[in-house]
Image (spheres, rainbow, N blue to C red):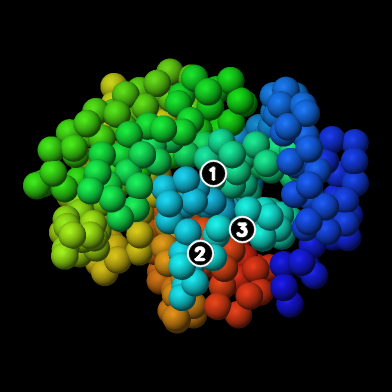
């Protein structure tokens, strides 16, 4: 079943209703062109969730910040995330599923969802540093080109996420470290979550690759945990790798597991999450492409399977 058939026949954006993906995109385009102030109005109207963690003590977020870094591929399709209407359709399906707590995205995606009115009662995390465009010579220079802490607070979001890739041979790493440290401090000053996604990275045949060995992830987690003037509001976003017990023992900070690429073995991925979720610091999942663009096309089914793991 496709996301289109999983979506309710009508939704409400502002005071208007629409029936199809094309109509939804047309309404958004009209609102953005004629009433740009509607974004701030929708943000102000949004019903916020009282706490990050619900009664389960777990957190399930859907990630949709890939396009802003030029990373549009999912599975074998290099432009899977290029159609914004299709992405929004899939996000709406995912956000409606029981057990999904919220979304992580850049301002353009979050604001589309705000205008669609689908973020009431959801945890909303703004993605901050998207300047390290995928495949570029400056990829490690992950400058803050999306949300900053003040904008996240003004938009009444629940926190900010940043990517930290440590490449020992690339001097741009120092700028990214400093930017992330400042963002952690600023978010904590507003009483908001700072979600840090750390990796040790290096260039292989000209492309940036993340080192997913336990030793590299232990180093990445250790560096990320010490960023900023306080770690009181810092969460980690980490991949499932071998020896997760050793990796997660490097910090006492709460952590969420990331989903990564669309897997050829979804059952194996689910089992990896299940094992890692038994560790005391692991509090949930942040999954994007593997739920929004599953190999079988069943977004609702993929989301439900991930929620069941929690």
Q: Secondary structure at mark 3?
A: loop
Tell me the quadrant of the picture where the N terminus can be found: bottom right
Residue 259 location, quadrant: bottom left
Q: Position of residue 203 (x, y in %)?
A: 17, 57
Residue 225 location, quadrant: top left
Residue 161 location, quadrant: top left
For residue 274, which numbered disc appears in the image? none
The answer to whether residue 276 of the structure is visible from this angle is yes
Pick whichever, 292 or 140, lies toward us: 140
Q: Position of residue 294 (x, y in %)?
A: 56, 72
Find disc 3 in the rendering and name its residue: 83
Mark 3 surroundings within 10 Å by alpha-carbon count, few (fewer than 14), some (14 through 19), many (20 or more): few
Mark 1 to mark 2 CA distance (whole Å): 18 Å
Pick whichever, 57 or 152, lies toward us: 152
Q: Mark 1 and mark 2 in contact? Answer it, CB < 8 Å.
A: no
The mark that comes first in sequence, 1 or 3, is 3
Q: Secondary structure at mark 2?
A: loop
């Amino acid at each position: 079943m496709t996301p289109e058939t999983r979506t309710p026949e009508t939704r409400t954006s502002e005071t208007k209703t629409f029936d199809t993906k094309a109509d939804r995109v047309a309404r958004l385009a009209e609102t953005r062109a004629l009433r740009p102030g509607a974004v701030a109005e929708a943000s102000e109207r949004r019903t916020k969730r009282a706490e990050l963690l619900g009664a389960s003590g777990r957190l399930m977020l859907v990630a949709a910040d890939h396009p802003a870094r030029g990373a549009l591929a999912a599975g074998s399709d290099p432009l899977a995330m290029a159609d914004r209407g299709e992405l929004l359709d899939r996000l709406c399906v995912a956000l409606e599923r029981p057990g999904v707590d919220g979304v992580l995205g850049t301002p353009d995606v979050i604001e589309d969802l705000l205008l669609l009115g689908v973020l009431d009662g959801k945890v909303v995390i703004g993605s901050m540093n998207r300047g390290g465009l995928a495949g570029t010579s400056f990829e490690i220079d992950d400058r803050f080109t999306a949300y900053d802490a003040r904008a996240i607070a003004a938009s009444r979001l629940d926190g900010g996420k940043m990517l930290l890739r440590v490449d020992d041979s690339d001097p741009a790493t120092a700028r990214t470290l400093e930017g992330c440290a400042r963002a952690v401090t600023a978010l904590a000053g507003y009483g908001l979550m700072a979600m840090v996604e750390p990796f040790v990275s290096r260039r292989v045949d000209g492309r940036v690759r993340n080192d997913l060995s336990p030793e590299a992830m232990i180093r990445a987690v250790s560096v990320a945990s010490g960023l900023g003037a306080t770690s009181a509001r810092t969460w980690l976003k980490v991949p499932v790798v071998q020896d997760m017990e050793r990796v997660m023992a490097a910090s006492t900070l709460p952590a969420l597991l990331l989903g990564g690429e669309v897997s050829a073995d979804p059952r194996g991925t689910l089992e990896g999450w299940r094992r890692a979720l038994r560790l005391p610091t692991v509090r949930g999942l942040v999954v994007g492409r593997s739920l929004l663009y599953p190999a079988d096309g069943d977004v609702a089914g993929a989301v439900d399977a991930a929620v069941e793991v929690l």
